[in-house]
Structures are given as C-alpha cells and as structure tokens.
Amino acid sequence: MTVNSVIKDYKEVISSRRSVRVYDPAVKISREEMTEILEEATLAPSSVNLQPWRFLVIDSPEGKAALEELAPGNLHQVKTSSAVIAVFGDMNAFDNADEIMSSAVERGFMPQDVKEKIMANYTDLFGRISAGAFREMILIDCGLVSMQLMLSARAHGYDTNPIGGYDKSRIAEAFGMDKELYVPVMLISIGKAAKEARKTTRLPIDRVAQWK
C-alpha cells in the first residue's frame, strides 16, 4: 500500500464519519469484531500510558431496557443500534501502572532500571495529585479513546453517535459498577445507519487556529 492510498483511506474514514441517530436494527456486530474495534481504540494515547478507560458494551435486550430509562432523550440510538458503549474513567487507574510498565519491560520496550525510575517518579506524583486533578486527566484520556473508537468503528463500516444526555449519576450503579470508582464520560451508540445522516459544516481554520 502506498503512502497516498493510506492517506486517502484515512481521509475517507474521517470525512464519512457522521453522528447517526437511527440504525438498522437487523445489523448486529459480533463480539469478535466489537473486541477488535475496542482493541484499535485503546491504541489511543493516555497520560503516562495509564489507559484509564473502561468500556461497558450494552447490547442485550435487558441492558438496553435499563439504559432506556437513563437516556430517555436518546431512545432511537439505544433501541436501534447494535450496541451502546458506555465509556468510564477508572479513578484507580494508577493501580495498573506497574503491570503496564512490566509488560513493556518483558517486550523489550523499556529497560528494567528505567521502569523502576519511572515508577518511583509516578508513585510520588500520583500520591500528591488531588482527586479532582486526576479526574480531569482521565476525562481527557477517555475523550481521546472515545474519538478513536468512533473512527475505528467507521473504518469497519459502522456508524456511531457520542451521547452526553443521560443520567450520569445513576449509570454506574444501574449496571452493578462502583460509582465512586468509575467516572461516566459518554455513551457511544454503534451500528449501521438506517439512512444517511445529515452533513454538517466546520468553521474555517483561520477562525480556529493561529500561528505565532
């Protein structure tokens, strides 16, 4: 594959992504393919590679019924999509730091002595950082993985819609999760569009960027 064809494919993915609200209910994404989409999404960057994102894939009739009560303004997406993915941030994400860095050592990506120095520095840092600052950090990281998830879904031929209008105060407990540990970020409906979504426009770059 040439560089030009890669760039063309990328442009097709980002330019064809739309926020879809009504899906073909007959289209079901297999668990195998959904896992692949999630794996691709988790290649997104995160602060010190903590990977604080956690996904709840809601695709069963029972799960969707519970979600309908929490997202009454987005019933079309919930009912017709193949699944709705609830993205959470894990407030205990640093607990996985040693495992993540040890894996990098095992694969030859990082020497052991470097890992030990980094772990010492980060243990000190995250021992001092406030819960509010850490929460802000994981929200940014989860925003990055959410966008990558939507682009990955589009590359697989599916459509998505990010949803912020739902009861974030109850969603964790509604699905048996610790609401103090898991911070709700957004819902992402995923499936095959039943009709072409409305196109949107963007502000010109000279309105949103500047050079110094």
Image: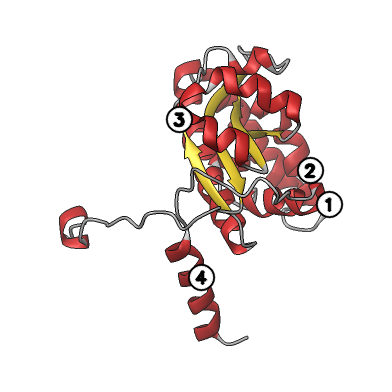
Q: Is residue 36 left or right of residue 201?
A: right
Please state which of the two labelled residues, at mark 3 or mark 4, is closer to the viewer.
3
For label 2, count other residues whose C-alpha is less than 10 Å away and answer few (under 14), some (14-19) or many (20+): some
* First-in-chain label (3 vs 4): 4
Q: Mark 4 or 1, which is nearer the eye?
A: 4
The image shows residue 115, relative to residue 208, as above or below, that is: above
The residues bearing labels 3 and 2 have C-alpha atoms spaced at a distance of 36 Å
Q: Residue at label 2?
A: 102
Whether residue 127 is visible: no
User: Residue drawn 52% across and 44% down?
Assistant: 22
For mark 3, what is the residue?
A: 164
Question: Which residue does the numbered mark 1 point to in the structure image?
Answer: 106
Callout 3, which amino acid?
Gly
Location of the N terminus (image quadrant): bottom right
User: Where is mark 4, residue-wise?
Assistant: 10
**Which amino acid does the dot numbered 4 rest on?**
Tyr
Instruction: Give the farthest residue toward the bottom.
Output: 2
Disc 3 to disc 4, how far (Cα)?
A: 26 Å
Q: For the residues marked 1 and 3, what is the alpha-carbon distance in whole angstroms?
A: 39 Å
Judged from the image, the secondary structure of the residue bearing numbered disc 4 is helix
Q: Amino acid at mark 1?
A: Glu
